[in-house]
Each structure stands twice: as C-alpha cells, then as structure tokens.
Image (spheres, helix red, strand yellow):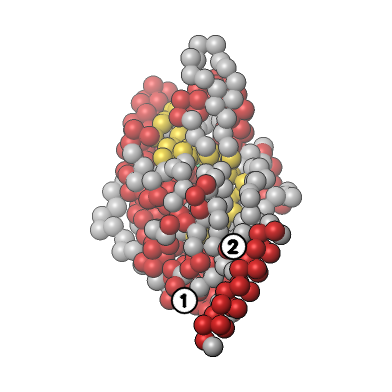
Amino acid sequence: MRTAILVIATVIAAVWLFGCYIQGDSPEAAFGSNTRVLSANSSPSDLHGPNEGGGGSDAEVGDADSDPAFEAARTNDPALERARAETPASKSKPLRILVIGAHPADIFDQSGGTMAHHVQRGDWVGCVVVTHGSRVHDKVVSDEMFRREEIPDAAELERIILERAEVKTKEILRACAILGVRSEDVYFLGADDAILLVNEPTIRQLARLIRKLRPNVVITHFPLEDAGIASQHATAGQMAMHAINFAGSVDPGDKTPPHKVTQVFFFGIGAAATRTDLWSSRGGFHNDIFIDITDVAAKKVASLDALVSQGYGGAYARKRIEFSDGAFGSRVKVPYAEGFISLKSTTHYFLPVSEIDLAHSKSSDHESISRSSFRVDVPPPREVER
Ligand SMILES: [Zn+2]
C-alpha cells in the first residue's frame, strides 16, 4: 500500500516538473527557491555594492536567521558585518577603482570606507590627488600666515609651500596605507590649490593616467557641487569627466590604447540634510548609492588621524565620522555610510535589491533606531604633531 502511494506521488511530481519545463521555468523556480542562478556568470559591471553582483545562496536572501547582514544589523556588531564581506556573494571579478580628489583629504573624507572595503575584497584601488593642497587649512601656510604682520617674499613663500606639500604627501601615503592602498598606486599631480581652473594640461595628464591604469570605476567630485562654479571640488570633478571622455580616444604621444571607464560614482553631496548656501540649493540630483562603512569606520578615523597638518587628526576625525558618515548613515538606517551619486543607469539581469536593504525591511522601527545608534569609539592618538 505504502509503495503504491509512493509510486503515485512520484508520477505526480514528475508530471508537474515536466509541466514546469514545458512552460520554461527552471526547476529552482518550480520549487520556489530563492537561489540566484547567476552565481556562475555574475557580471563585474554590477556595481551597486559588494554583495549584489555575485549571485548568492538561499541563506543570503531568504533565511534571516543565518544571514550575517541581518545578524549584524540586529546585534549592532561591526565584527559580524565583516563576515558579510566574506560571503560567497561578495566574490566577483576584481574591479579596478580609481579615486580622484582635488585636495589631500578629499579622497579619505568622502570615500575612505568604500576604498577600504574594495581593498579588502581584493579589488585594485588607486588614488589621484590633483593639487598639493598646501593652502588647505594648513598649519603653516594657512594658520600662521593669517596671524603674521607681513607675508614672506615670493621665493621664501614658494619654498614654504613646497615644504608643506611634502608634509601633505607623506600624510596622504600614511592615510592610504591605513586603508590598504599601496603607495605605488597613489599619484600626485601637484597642481597649486591657489586658483584651480579647468585646464587642458591637467585633463591630458589625467586622461593618460586613466589609459595607463585602466579603471572600471572612477570615484570623484560631483562636477555640479556648489553649482559647479564656486568650488575646486567641482573643477576637479569636471576635469575628471573631460579626462574620462578623452581617455576613450587616442592622444598623439601616448602609446597606450584608449580605455573606457564603466561607471563613475561622484562623492555624495550634503551629508547633513540642511542646505547652507545659495549654491547648494540648486539640485535635481540625489545620492543614490550608499555604502555601509560601519565595519571600517575605525579604520577611516585612523586614516583621517594621519592628516595632521590640516587639523584633521584627533578630535576632528572623531567629530567628522559622526557629522558626515553618521549623517549619511542616518538617512539609510546604518551607523555610518558614505553616499555617492552614480553617473549612469546600470544594466542587470535581475532587479538589484541589496541584502542590507532586505535586512532593514525585516527590522522593526526600534531595531532600526537601535542599529543606527552604534557609535565607533577610537581612542585619540597620544600626540598630535603638526
Ligand atoms: Zn577638498
């Protein structure tokens, strides 16, 4: 009797499965599994985050209890968030990411956590610093000159500026090393940060670097920051865009073949919700990508600590992680985040839904507030040398 029931059940299951194939469904679909069938052929062009491009398993999508992202969210434990970076879904073809900043601190301020994530995943991360940044609230060139009776003569002033540029260079390399970026992957264009205008030689320099380094992704300033007219950040972003376009073509004298950048992410605008001046009131754009950097927030603070000459080390680094990354994070219910504006629409096989967002939708309001209340506690460096 039992054998007869088993035979009938097997026949029914076989007919049902056959029906599914006739209709074009995969067996996974037929069985209602959440398995993502892209895992073997995931596209590196899926740039929305470390956990979305590589396919995944049932546990990542459907089973909240064994989902490290959800566990991390529920328990406020950054260590658990690190586990998320080690899930199979985070493995995709290595990306090449080039970060272009106007001043020494910009790349760390705006994308230090994101850089650390990608280095950890095994992606190549390189940095370009367009100006030497000697004037950016530097202890000597900015602070001391402000209080002097008279400014030194031209030759002496230029010597001081170059000396301070060297200090900044060392700080940048130290900050990069903390995030895992190798010194040989950091490029200094050395432009003066007195008056930075969009100019052909710098664009040509950047384009040659892009052809040589062949990044899939460029991260840089939003070209319309401060309406694109009142900011060296905007100028650097505009030059980066000209360079990206030019890199896709040939340049007499440069034997490196053209290179096309896949995607550009601009540094997010206005971590705090309040707009503070006329320029930032112009808009139409919004930060559409957020990277949860909670697990590397301490590392980011340490990298900002390295920027001593401009007063970022110590108290300011700790304040900064709260008012900038904490403010971005509060918008998306994580403790700390970096915001970005993506240049292009992206193409996927499936609709992109992030695991972090899925985990959020499983949280109650109080769990969300509790999760985003986590604060990183990094002891200040013992001695801040300027
Ligand atoms: Zn800057």
Q: Is residue 174 left or right of residue 340?
A: left
Q: Is residue 164 above or below residue 362?
A: above
Q: Is residue 184 visible?
A: yes
Real-space CA distance between mark 1 and mark 2, rounded to the nearest whole angstrom: 25 Å
Q: Residues within 10 Å of mark 1 (few under 14, many from 20)?
A: few
Instruction: Tell me if residue 208 comes above or below residue 315 in the rendering.
Output: above
Look at the numbered disc 1 and give the secondary structure of its residue: helix
Disc 2 crowd rating (10 Å Cα; few below 14, some 14-19, many 20+) is few
Residue at the left extreme, as displayed: 382
The disc label shown at residue 215, or none:
none
Q: Which residue is mark 2?
A: 27
Which one is nearer the viewer's eye here, 274 or 81?
81
Residue annotated with mark 1: 65
- Near-viewer residue (87 or 267): 87
Amino acid marked by disc 1: Asp
Cβ of disc 2 within 8 Å of ligand 1?
no
In the figure, 31 relative to 146: above or below? below
Which residue corresponds to the image point at 60% horizontal and 78% vertical from the top-left?
Answer: 8
Amino acid identity at mark 2: Pro
